Structure formats: C-alpha cells, structure tokens
Amino acid sequence: MAVRTADPYRDLDVIDAHAPRVNQAVIGAVALLAVATGWWPLLGLLCLQLVLGLTMGRRWCLACVAYFELLQPRIGEGPLEDARPPRFANMMGAIVLGAATLAYAVGVPLGGAVLGLLVAGLALLAAVTGLCTGCEIYRLGARLRGIGSRRITRIDPADVGGVTDGAIVQFTHPLCSDCHRLERDLRGQGRSVITVDVRHRPDLARKYGVAIVPTAIAVDAAGAVRSRIA
C-alpha cells in the first residue's frame, strides 16, 4: 500500500490534487445524466452531497471516500495542493446545482437544464484537463485581495526573524507539494528564502492577507515588498 504524506480526513488544509478531479468527474457525469434523462432530482442529490462534504467533512463526500479508500492506495498519493480553491469550487457547484433543482421544481425546466449543463460542462472540463473554473475564480479573488491590501506592501522583519536585501519571504505549508518545489527552485537560484509555515503561524497569514500557498515575495532589508514571486 502506498504511503500517505497527508491524512485525507485530518489534514484538511491540503488535498491530493487527484481527488477533486475524481469528484468533478462524478459530478459532471451525474449532472449530464440528469439533464439528458429528465431525472432532475439527481441534481438536488448532487447539491446535497456537496453541502454534506463542505459542512461535515470529506468522509461525507462519497466520490472523495471512493478515491481515498479505493484508488489512492493503488496509484499512490498525487501532488498535494491548497484545499481552499477546490473547496470554493464545490461551494459554487452546490449553489448552481441548488438553483438548477429549484428551477426544475418551480416549472422552469429550460433554466434548470441550462444550469445543470453548465455544471456538467465545467466539472467534466476540470476532470479531463485539470482546469477548474471555480479554483481559478478563487485564486483571482485571492490575488485581488492581496493586491488591494496594504498589509502586503511590507513585511515586518521582526515577524520572520529578520530579513536581508533581496530575501524571499515564502508563506508555505509542510504538506504542500508546490511550496516545496518553489522553495527548491528559489534556493537553487541562490536566493535567500525565509519560510513562514501557515499551519503554525496562521496569525501571520491573516496579518498579511495570504489567501493561498505558496505565496512568495521579495523584500528589501527594511521589509518593503519589492516584487511578488508567486
């Protein structure tokens, strides 16, 4: 059995990147079936399943459990990524599926079919290509929040144990594959990297408006932000 780096039911701030794609494949296939056959209550069941997973944890997400218990032990753990973008995508999916169900229920089948096909198309696109529209919307919003916040214009050197001119302050997570890859690349370029573990320092993540990891910024000796690296 493949060794897991992250426990899928306890390490909720990260997720195996393959798990959301399996979930999206199931959502897309079932939503398409619902619209094609007219069995629109299936859309409501999909909405309920997403809501249960979002509010009660991954053990209530049937597609997630199937992946973690049946597939992951055989194919191995995939890259670990920040769990917040796919979670936001699930929230969007639940809202649109709920609206589609409501449209069918009140006698507007065309509206329900359009919304159902929208979910099916975007979910299957994410499953096949990895392009998750909801995730990209989350990342765009996170970037806009970071740019709009004055807190990110300067890092207090005391918060990170001091900085030198040209140093990179990287907000990271110990289980984030992209974080480790970025840190290796930066150190390989000879850059000085100061890491801030958001798991142990969530206060600093909140203080500087870090909504997604990895976030890396170059600073000068006074802590003023010179540029965003990632």
Image: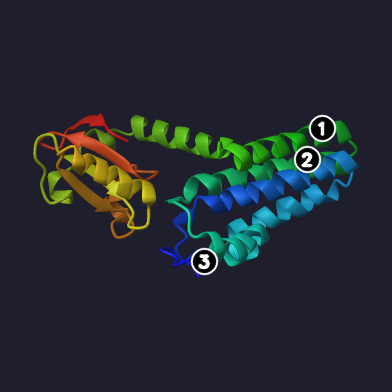
Q: Badge 1 is on which residue?
A: 111
Nearer-the-camera pick, 124 or 108: 124
Looking at the image, the residue that sits furthest to the bottom is 1
**Disc 3 vs disc 2: which is toward the camera?**
3
Residue 206: give x, y in percent of width and height.
Answer: 33, 48
Measured along the vertical axis of the image, is residue 25 above or below residue 70? above
Measured along the vertical axis of the image, is residue 174 above or below residue 162? below
Of the image marks 2 and 1, the number of the one nearer the N terminus: 2
Q: Amino acid at mark 1?
A: Gly
Position of the C terminus, as image quadrant, is top left
Instruction: Evaluate whether residue 127 shows in this view.
Output: yes
**Disc 1 vs disc 3: which is toward the camera?**
3
- Label disc, if present, on residue 100 of the rendered structure: 2
Q: Are marks 1 and 3 in contact (CB under 8 Å)?
A: no
Alpha carbon of mark 3 to alpha carbon of mark 2: how far?
A: 30 Å
Of the image marks 1 and 3, the number of the one nearer the N terminus: 3
Q: Is residue 200 left or right of residue 114?
A: left
Instruction: Evaluate whether residue 57 shows in this view.
Output: no
Q: Is residue 171 left or right of residue 134?
A: left
Q: Amino acid at mark 2?
A: Ala
